[in-house]
Amino acid sequence: MSILMFEAMKENLAKDLKVSENSISIISAFCKKDALEFLDAQIGEKQGISKRLLVRFRLDDILSKVTDLEIYEYCKKNNWSLYVQFNLHAKIYVIDQNICYMGSANATNKGLSINKKGNLEMSKRFELDNEEKIQIEEVFSEALLMNDNLFEKMKKQINSINYTPIIKNEWNKEIIAKNINSYNVLFQDDFPINALPTEMLDDEVFLDIYKDDSIEVIKEKFYNTKIVQWLINILEKQENKEIYFGELTEKIQNIIFQEPIQYRKDVKLLQAKLYNWIETLDYKNLKVDIPKRHSQRIRLIEE
């Protein structure tokens, strides 16, 4: 099937949801309650169907209303399991553990063109192979299952904030500590799209980094991204706390989600941009070099 754009994504997804038999899994950085109601209407009142939703659920997402806090209570009432992952960027819809839609469409009115005034989104419909099914399960296994206790803590913090868009808001340390990545799956969106942080042609929207950010802000934001923290995690396990380009390429290939061919980028190109950013931002504990007669190497230096 060709790339689906605008309402074609919504129409095809609706058809598949209507004939779903056993499970629905949605992974969406942003989610609005009315979009979830639309998806539920397509599923209908089938008995015994498993439904789960994974959202990013950052504090600023809720305060800026790109995600509704109310989706938790909606999920409880309508038999959805709600998961959160603060580093989430992916947009994936899986029906009966087989049919998959993947692209740029969040589970929002504009993302799915529900009100015919949607964003310019593109998605691909394809069938998951066994390895991809395992990767989807790993994405959920890394996430935190929302419960009443965590939800009440989030609401309490939200109610204590006088929201100003220009101020960055984050969950408190107690909430963040519950959402620790195990780094079993990477997506292309976890890598930077610009060649250099100092010559950004486009905002790094998925990484929450923008062209008008100062270099100091970019340096801090990028260090806290999933890809950099995954890399540090890899280096900590390596002998001598170092790894060469080819070996790291293999590790990335082993865990990166195999996206549809129209979206797939060469892993080495993604990795090269990662190295460029690390070199340019000049982190004290991460150094890229080329030892004599060797390929490019990255090292973790203990401070």
Image (tube, rainbow, N blue to C red):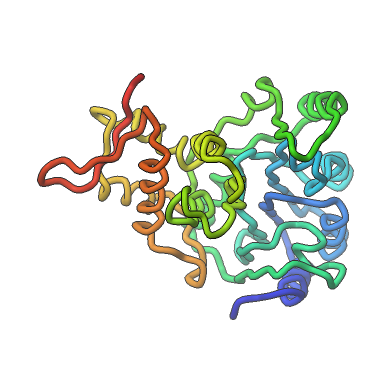
Residue 228: x, y in percent? Answer: 45, 39
| In the image, residue 160 above or below residue 55 | above
The residue positioned farthest toward the left in the image shown = 293
Q: Nearer the viewer, residue 198 or 239?
A: 198
Picture quadrant where residue 269 is located: bottom left
Residue 16: x, y in percent? Answer: 73, 70
Side of 98 where 40 appears, left or right = right
Q: Is residue 182 visible?
A: no
Q: Is residue 61 visible?
A: yes
Side of 135 where 94 appears, left or right = right
| In the image, residue 282 above or below residue 67 | above
Q: State the quadrant of the C terminus.
A: top left
Q: Residue at x 77, y 31 (%)?
A: 147
Side of 85 where 275 appears, left or right = left
| In the image, residue 251 above or below residue 159 | below
Q: Residue at x 38, y 49 (%)?
A: 252
How many tags in the picture? 0
Q: Residue at x 73, y 34 (%)?
A: 167
Residue 189: x, y in percent? Answer: 54, 54
The residue positioned farthest toward the bottom in the image shown = 2
Residue 49: x, y in percent? Answer: 76, 54
Picture quadrant where residue 177 is located: top right
Q: State the quadrant of the N terminus.
A: bottom right
Picture quadrant where residue 282 is located: top left
Q: Residue at x 62, y 31 (%)?
A: 179
| In the image, residue 108 above or below residue 75 | below
